[in-house]
Image (cartoon, rainbow, N blue to C red):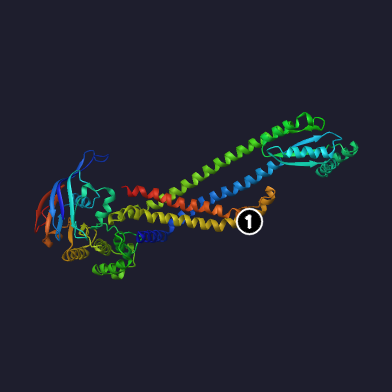
Amino acid sequence: MKIFLKRIFKNGWLNFQRSQGLSIITVFVMFLTVSMVSSIFLFKGIGDFLLVSLESKIDISVYFKEGTSEQEVLNTKDLLLEIDGVKKVNYISQEEAVDNFKERYQDDEVILQALEEVGGNPFLTSLEVTAEDTLKYDSVTTFLEQNRFEGLIENVDYYQRKPVIDKFYSIKGTFERSGLLASLILSLVAFSITFVTVRLAIYSASEEIGIMRLVGASNWFIRGQFIVQGMICGGLAVLITLVIFPIFSYIFSSKLLSLTGGFNLFNFYLKNFFNLLGIQFLIGIGLGSTSSVIAVRKYLEK
Amino acid sequence: MIKFQGVNKIYPANNLNPKPTQALKDISFEIKENEFILIAGRSGAGKTTIIKMLIGEEMPSSGRVFFSFTDEQKTVRNIEVNKLKKHDLPELRKQIGVVFQDYKLLPRKTVFENVAYALEVIGASDKQIKDEVPKALKIVGLSKRSDHFPSELSGGEKQRVAIARALIHRPKLIIADEPTGNLDPYHTWDIVKLLLKINELGETVILATHDQDIVNNLEKRVISLEEGQLLKDVKKGKYII
């Protein structure tokens, strides 16, 4: 058995080495496939980051009546934090509210002047509530509609924001589903192209396969060397990807950082290096060997 | 060693041939060990069909084909070739060395590797391959060409590589199917002499040919075929077709 395995590997390597042109093309096509899958992985990372960023900006505000004490507001905050699904509650005092307003409209003289003319501080103390998902906002609003809060709460802006919140989650769901579908379709196309390429490579060796059978080689002895050849092509494709991807992710990292508002592509690549490497080897070597098995079968059954 | 018993082969009708084609009609003969047999006939007489049946590449439409030999354990094995399954064919083919008209060499392997391949498939050790292959190449006169690829050889040299590959694993039977068909007269007799030498060393040899000169000069047993039928089976035969 050991000697047969050794010969299978030797013959597979020699076949790869001596079919230079065909081997280069096969490695190139497999490199494109592995790169496509790796790109999908990285794009998913970017997409997830953007979605999380946007999601973290979704919240509802609870405005308290003029004269509500800070202690009452903080008590309400503590009660809200106990609700299942509430992620964060931020307390914004009246002073903080006016400062935030001035900062947001610091370039707009007209609005700042209007604030001056209104006089005093027109803003109310508020709590910004962030939940884990849209359904939890319903629970928060229902909680705040209890009688005990009637004298404290001026307004909860959930119903004004609900259409926007619902829209966001709908878009998020669509984005995730279509992302998955696009990934599957692209992967399928890439796999098909790779399979056809490997099949063409083995077609060119179909006469050789016939000769091997006439000399007395068993099916597995013949099949094995083509599997090895496919694995070598896949392995090389992965190695090339391993060299190119870190360089590209480093180059594009700074640009993406400013575009996405904080996503560091190179760090993401490094953090997920071993996961990505595992996927690449699975795709490269798995695809190479599986394609070879399927392509050779036709000539062994003759 | 070999027995053909009432063998018929009919190829079914297809788009190009509306009528079925009978390639062999009621063929029966026996070949003993150490014989040198010539199967003679025109192109299309059925010579190659007989050879294909011996190596299991074709199955008879009716009749039986037997191949018997004594294995390494001195046990007599009697194989009915027409009953073998596909996965059993490699074992049969390891007992037979075949030389084809179109050489059938592996183009991506050197002369040495082509000959060694016949030993690799039977699981011979690296040492055995290293010892035996140069000897076989020496017998066929190709020691100096062992690192060359088939594309770098002449027709005669290619055929000699094929013969070396056919006999390297000491098969019980050597079959040469029109081995000189693509060669000039000079190389033709080189090959024929080589086959005679192999027979003298104790191998059973079947040589299928349509070359009258070879048949008439060798004075060996001749099985003559015409349109799939066995015309004559003569001990010191001549080309009669």
> For the residue labelled by badge 1, is the local secondary structure a helix, a strand or a loop?
helix
Hey, what amino acid is under mark 1?
Ile
Q: Tell me if residue B45 can be seen.
A: no
Q: Is residue B58 above or below residue A122?
A: below
Q: In this view, does B192 lie above or below B6?
A: below
> Which residue in the structure is indicated by mark 1?
A251
Q: In this rendering, would B146 be left or right of B175? A: right
Depth check: give the residue in front, A7 or A117.
Answer: A7
Task: Give the position of the N terminus of chain B as an image quadrant.
Answer: bottom left
Q: In this rendering, would B34 be left or right of B136? A: left
Give percent across and percent down for residue A235: 48, 56
Give percent across and percent down for residue B15: 27, 39
Label 1 packing within 10 angstroms: few (<14), some (14-19), many (20+):
few
Give percent across and percent down for residue A172: 63, 39
**Seen from this angle, which residue lies furthest top?**
A147
Give percent across and percent down for residue B65: 18, 49
Q: In this rendering, would B192 be left or right of B114? A: left
Q: Residue shown at 27%/65% (left/top)? A: B157
Q: In this view, does B15 lie above or below B129?
A: above
- Place residue A16 in its image quadrant: bottom left
Q: In this rendering, would A81 be left or right of B32? A: right
Q: Residue shown at 61%/54% (left/top)? A: A271
Q: Tell me if residue A262 can be seen.
A: yes
Depth check: give the residue in front, A79 or A34.
Answer: A79
